Structures are given as C-alpha cells and as structure tokens.
C-alpha cells in the first residue's frame, strides 16, 4: 500500500469516527447538564458529612505527627548528621577540586594572555579610530541636541512662567501643612548633630595640630605655585615685549 493510500484510509477513518460521534455530542451534553444539578444537590446534602470527614482526617494526620514526633525528629537529625558528615568527609575533595579549577583558569588565562593583549589593543585602537573618524558627526549631533533642548525650553518658557505661581503656592501650602513635622525633624536633627559634635570634640581637639600644619603646608605650596606662575607669566610677557 502506498503512502497516499494510507493517508486516504486515515482520513476516511477520521471522517467515519466524526460522523459517529457528532450525533451523540448533544445527547452527551444534555446528560452532563442534567447531572450537574444532581451532583450539586448531593454535595449540599452531604456537605456536613464531608466537612466532618475532612476535619477528622486532619485531626488524624496531626495526631499521627504528634505521636511520631520524636521518631520524626530523630530521623531528621540522622539525615542532617549524615549529610554533614558526608560534606565534611568530602570537604578535602571539594577544596581540591575548587583549587584545580582556579589553577586551570589561571593557567588558561596565562597561556592566552599573549594572544588576548594584542586583540584587546586592536579593539581599543579600532574603537578610538571609529570615534575619531566620526567625531564631526558626534559633535554635530551633540550641538543639535543642545539646540533642540534650548528651543524646547524657550518654547515652553511661557507655560513654565504661568505654572511658577501655582508651583510656589503648592510648595508653600505643603510646607505650611507640614511645618510642625519639619520643625520637629529639624529640632531632632540639631540635637543629633550637637550630640555627635560633643562626642567628637576630643577627637577634633586632638586633630587640631594636624589640621593647622596641613593648612600651613597647603598655603606654602599655594604661594610657591603662585610665584612660579608669576615667573612663567613674566617670561612669556618678556618673550612678547622684550622687557618685563
């Protein structure tokens, strides 16, 4: 029998089965719909019994657990102890395996480093060259973005100006409504800062000599740099005007 014949026979079988089932679907559906009210009625009639049975089952399970709790706990302890002992016994192997993995990774990186470094350098050079080749476009895009932002702000300025009084009014109302909380938090913050400063006074006093010496050293460095800047400025000026 060819493949086409098998396909045709399969299709005919499906069609025959469909013809036999379709007329009976309405009968099956009607039977189901008729049975649903009876099922619901039976459930309602036996609901107290079902609930009592469920409660009894739960009580039996809980009672069984409570009666066997020592054995359950002992079994759990044995399982945990066995797992811990197994882990402890295997710990040297785990550590050794981890070390071998780390060593293999390091060795692999070391072996590939001569190849990786030139590739990284090439990649960096390619990125830099691409940026340099497109620097004009990037700058133009940045300028256009800034211009667009500026134009948007200018266009929206009247609306922003109109909204400023409303914003200020709402801000004042929010501050007024929350003024007691703000004052309370401010007082708490001041107290905390005062407590922190009081606690830090001994440390600050001990650091005063270091702070003073650091300030003097920085001032000396600043003035020496200023002298060097003045000297270089004079040399530059002499070079331009032939006198100082």
Image: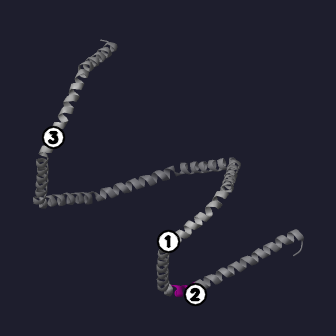
Name the spot of residue 218 as percent of width and height, x first. Answer: 65, 80
When asked about the image quadrant of residue 224, the answer is: bottom right
Distance CA(mark 2)–CA(mark 3) = 94 Å
Residue placed at 49% from the left, 50% from the top?
111
Q: Are marks 3 and 1 in contact (CB under 8 Å)?
A: no
In this picture, is 36 found above or below 110? Answer: above
Q: Is residue 176 above or below residue 145?
A: below
Position of residue 85 measured from the top left corner of the image (x, y, whole percent): 23, 60
Callout 1 environment at 10 Å: few (<14), some (14 to 19), or many (20+)?
few
Q: CA distance from mark 1 to mark 2?
A: 48 Å
Is 208 one of the magenta-colored residues? yes
Q: Which residues are magenta?
A: 203-210
Between discs 2 and 3, the one toward the N terminus: 3
Classified by dominant secondary structure, the portion drawn in magenta counts as helix
The residue carrying mark 1 is 177
Q: Which residue is mark 2?
A: 209
Callouts 2 and 3 close, C-beta under 8 Å? no
Q: Earlier in the sequence, mark 1 or mark 2?
A: 1
Q: Is residue 5 above or below residue 59?
A: above
Q: Are marks 1 and 2 in contact (CB under 8 Å)?
A: no
Above or below 114: residue 3: above
Give the SS element for disc 3: helix
- Pick whichever of labels 3 and 1 is earlier in the sequence: 3
Q: Position of residue 149 (x, y in %)?
A: 66, 54
- Secondary structure under tag 2 reads helix
The image's mark for residue 41 is 3
Disc 3/disc 1 C-alpha distance (Å):
61 Å
Q: How is the image coloured?
A: one colour
Measured as percent of width and height from the top left, residue 238 is found at 86, 72
Looking at the rendered image, the quarter that the C terminus falls into is bottom right
């Amino acid at each position: 029998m060819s493949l086409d014949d098998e396909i045709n026979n399969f299709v005919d079988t499906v069609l025959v089965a469909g013809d036999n089932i379709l007329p009976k679907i309405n009968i099956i559906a009607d039977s189901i719909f008729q049975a649903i009210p009876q099922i619901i009625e039976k459930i309602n009639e036996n609901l107290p019994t079902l609930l009592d049975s469920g409660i009894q089952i739960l009580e039996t399970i809980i009672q069984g657990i409570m009666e066997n709790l020592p054995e359950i706990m002992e079994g759990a302890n044995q399982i945990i102890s066995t797992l811990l002992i197994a882990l402890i016994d295997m710990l040297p192997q785990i550590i050794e395996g981890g070390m071998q993995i780390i060593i293999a990774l390091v060795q692999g990186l070391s072996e590939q480093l001569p190849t990786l470094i030139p590739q990284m350098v090439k990649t960096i050079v390619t990125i830099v060259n691409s940026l340099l080749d497109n620097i004009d476009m990037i700058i133009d895009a940045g300028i256009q973005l800034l211009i667009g932002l500026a134009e948007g702000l200018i266009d929206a300025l009247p609306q922003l100006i109109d909204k400023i009084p409303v914003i200020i009014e709402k801000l004042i109302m929010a501050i007024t409504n929350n003024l007691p909380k703000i004052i309370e938090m401010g007082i708490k913050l001041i107290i905390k800062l005062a407590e922190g400063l009081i606690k830090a006074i001994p440390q600050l006093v001990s650091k005063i000599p270091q702070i003073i010496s650091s300030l003097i050293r920085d001032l000396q460095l600043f003035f020496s740099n200023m002298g060097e800047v003045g000297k270089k400025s004079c040399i530059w000026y002499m070079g331009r005007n032939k006198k100082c």
